[in-house]
Image (spheres, grey):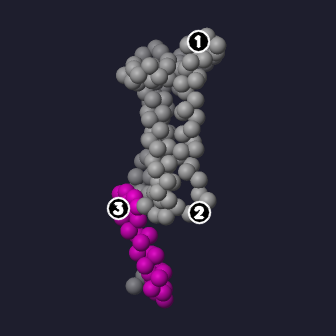
Amino acid sequence: MSEQTHGASGEQLLAMMEQEEDTGGVIRVKLKPRPLGSPPLGFLLSLPLLALPFGGWLVESGLLVLARCSFKTMFGLPCMGCGATRATLNVLHGDWLEALFFQPLVLTIYTLVALWGVTSLVLYIRGEELEVHTATWLTWTLRIGLLALPFINWVYLVSLEI
């Protein structure tokens, strides 16, 4: 018996075993009851996506004139968000492949936020929420990947001279 488990109650031992289980598996997802008063955060954060058609209409009708990217003007290189307006307009016209060409990261973010919003709303209606546990190595891999994605996207934009 280890130092930690010596003298521990049954409940404490079960809690320690569950904690060890959490780190042993790669991903564990379970549904649990939503606490009363807990808002559907994913849905609320996805609401600005509903304004995209209005913004696209403003740009296309000429009521909103966007200046050229100041980063690109100063340095001759695209910024990490270059192509986002063109990609958004292509999405609004249903041309997903062209949008993916102009700005793959923005299109990916739109898609993930929309999925998160719909999932959050459905679970909110059902009175549930997701609890996700990942192995420590996977958590760190995802974090590093999320930090690397904007740089990889920027290298892609520079290579295409967008």
Image point 44% across, 41% down: which residue?
115
Left or right placement of residue 25 versus residue 153 in this view = left
Quarter of the image with the N terminus is: bottom left
Q: Secondary structure at mark 1?
A: loop
Q: Secondary structure at mark 2?
A: loop
List the single residue furthest toward the front: 125
Left or right placement of residue 86 versus residue 96 in this view = right
Q: Residues within 10 Å of mark 1 (few under 14, many from 20)?
A: few
Q: Amino acid at mark 2?
A: Leu
Q: Nearer the viewer, residue 144 or 62?
A: 62
- Tally the marks: 3
Q: Secondary structure at mark 3?
A: loop
Res 25 label: 3
Indicate whether residue 24 is drawn in magenta. Answer: yes
Q: Which residue is mark 1?
A: 61
List the single residue furthest toward the left: 25
Give how far across and how far down residue 98 sits, in percent: 39, 19
Q: Is residue 123 above or below residue 59?
A: below
Q: Amino acid at mark 1?
A: Ser
Q: CA distance from mark 1 to mark 3?
A: 53 Å
List the single residue furthest toward the bottom: 7
> Is residue 18 something that shows in the picture?
yes
Give the residues drawn in magenta, as a range. 4-30
Q: CA distance from mark 1 to mark 2?
A: 45 Å
Q: Residues within 10 Å of mark 3 (few under 14, many from 20)?
A: few
Q: CA distance from mark 3 to mark 2?
A: 30 Å
Image point 49% across, 39% down: which residue?
113
Q: Which residue is mark 2?
A: 36
Q: Amino acid at mark 3?
A: Gly
Image point 60% across, 17% down: which residue?
58
